[in-house]
Amino acid sequence: MGVIARQSIKGALANYLGVAIGFVITFFVLTRYLTEEEVGLTRVMVDAAMIFASLAQLGTNSSIVKFFPHFKDDSNNHGLFGLSLLLPLAGFTMVALLFLIFREPLVAMYAGKSPLVADYFYMLPMLTFFALYMGVFETNASVLMRITVPKMVREVGIRLFNLVAYLLYGYRVISLDVFVWMFCGSYGLAMLLNLMYLMKLNHFRWGVLKVDWNFLTRERRKEIGRYTMFMTVTVLAGNVPFFNSLFLGAKAGLALTGVYTIAFYIANVVEVPYRSLGAISRPVVAAAVKENNWGEVNRLVRQVSLHQLLVSSAIFLVIWINLDTLYAFIPNGASYAGGAGVVLMMGMAKAFNSSFSIGTDVLNFSRYYSRSLLFMAILTVSAILLNPLLIELWGITGAASATLFSYLLYYTLLLGYIYWRTRVSLFSAAQLKVVALTAAGFALNLLWGSVVTPLFDGSKSAMLLDAALKTTVLVALLAATTYAWKVSPTVNSMIDKLLKKDVR
């Protein structure tokens, strides 16, 4: 776990640095210099590109992780990484053809409520290509246990590139057309930086990229082909949240999509830790599954699931108790405050997904991976059916609720199947303690709001003081309870070591 711990910590630091930069950019630059419609435009374009890129990769990212233990030896990887470049190129060619074939009906779908999307639809293939290979290069780095630099590029680099575009457009140095080009180009620059990093690692050279057709026997090709075919479809399960903005853009317009975007960003912070731990734990889980070491798999997934739930729930609680204060301070905050319901629903969905998505990895790396197709279909179909229905009932909160309900159904069925087939279970009594502590935190927040908050005069400085006191008291109380209740031996051990150092 040493490599996992080191790379996870470094990756998490990169993620949170990106979150800090993204916080400033999103809440004090984006909301000031872009209209709600323009914010919605950037969200719809990125989400559409991510969905198309996930299709174009043809399951490559998952295949690299799954088959790397099979291909790796002391000298080379027998051309696995060469395949990781060729397969997405074929997939992108097919997606580009779909763009051409269905361009007119797709543009017509947005022309009424979201004409800006229709105007810039032609840029989606380019953005899709950049997002596709940025992800492929990032996955290449992850199986080499080198995730920090790609995480910095994704979480920090893209945000800084976009900041330049936001400011230039905000001060009217560039036109909207140039802004959109720069916004899309930031993903292209990120793709190139990831490529340069792999070249620096001596990873992109002929000996590494050349496919060893003698090693890639007919049976191996059939196995990779079957796995890739299924993962091409099942990868859509990870993109369910992206459907929300696409449905909102078509049914409610870009203004409400912009409000949803800001709320989604707030909730998205909840799953930041899993981006690092998930990326570095997947290869370890894949190796354990390959060896049929189900005891180790069970230990790993329980550990990951518990700590993800603990961390994500704590972050979600801190966000929720400070949400009103956040909206009060951001530029044009009153226009975006209607997204509070989105934060609540998506926050729960993100915490739930962060804790249990490791189960998806277990299934995908096992010999039962083909069953992922059924569970993905359930998740995707439920999201597609629930989005228009709940958007009609509850607006932007309905879109977030569709994601939450879809995840609940998906993981209930998926984790039950995994336990039936492998006896691997992500659940533990400690998770119930985390849920109880989180519920207690929400209850204490309501009590504080009715008893303590009215004592303040309602000014912005008073709001800040109230929020600081509330956060400090509630977090300290819940942290002490977590330690005393021994929710996590690992966390308790870390705290004990820190306390011993302080005593010395």
Image: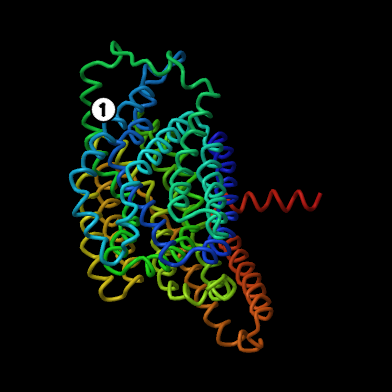
Residue 182 screen position, x and y as percent: 48, 47
| Depicted 184 relative to depicted 203: above or below | below
Residue 356 placement, left or right of 446: left
| Label 1 Cα neighbours within 10 Å, binned few <14 / some 14-19 / many ≥20 | some
Residue 260 screen position, x and y as percent: 40, 66
Residue in the foreground of this view, choosing between 280 and 206: 206
Q: Name the outermost residue toward the right.
A: 504
Residue in the foreground of this view, choosing between 160 and 358: 160
Residue 366 in view in this figure: no
- Residue occupying image coordinates x 37% and y 21%: 71
Residue 166 screen position, x and y as percent: 53, 56
The type of colouring in the image is: rainbow
Residue 335 in view in this figure: yes
Element at label 1: helix
- Residue occupying image coordinates x 34% and y 36%: 62
Residue 338 placement, left or right of 400: right
| Depicted 217 relative to depicted 414: above or below | above
Name the quadrant containing residue 361. Answer: top left
Name the quadrant containing residue 83. Answer: top left
Residue 150 screen position, x and y as percent: 51, 37
Residue 251 placement, left or right of 441: left
Say what amino acid the circle numbered 1 marks. Ile
- Residue occupying image coordinates x 46% and y 53%: 306
| Depicted 362 relative to depicted 45: above or below | above
| Residue tagged 1 | 224
Residue in the foreground of this view, choosing between 429 and 42: 42
Numbered label tally: 1
- Residue occupying image coordinates x 30% and y 39%: 364
Residue 343 placement, left or right of 53: right
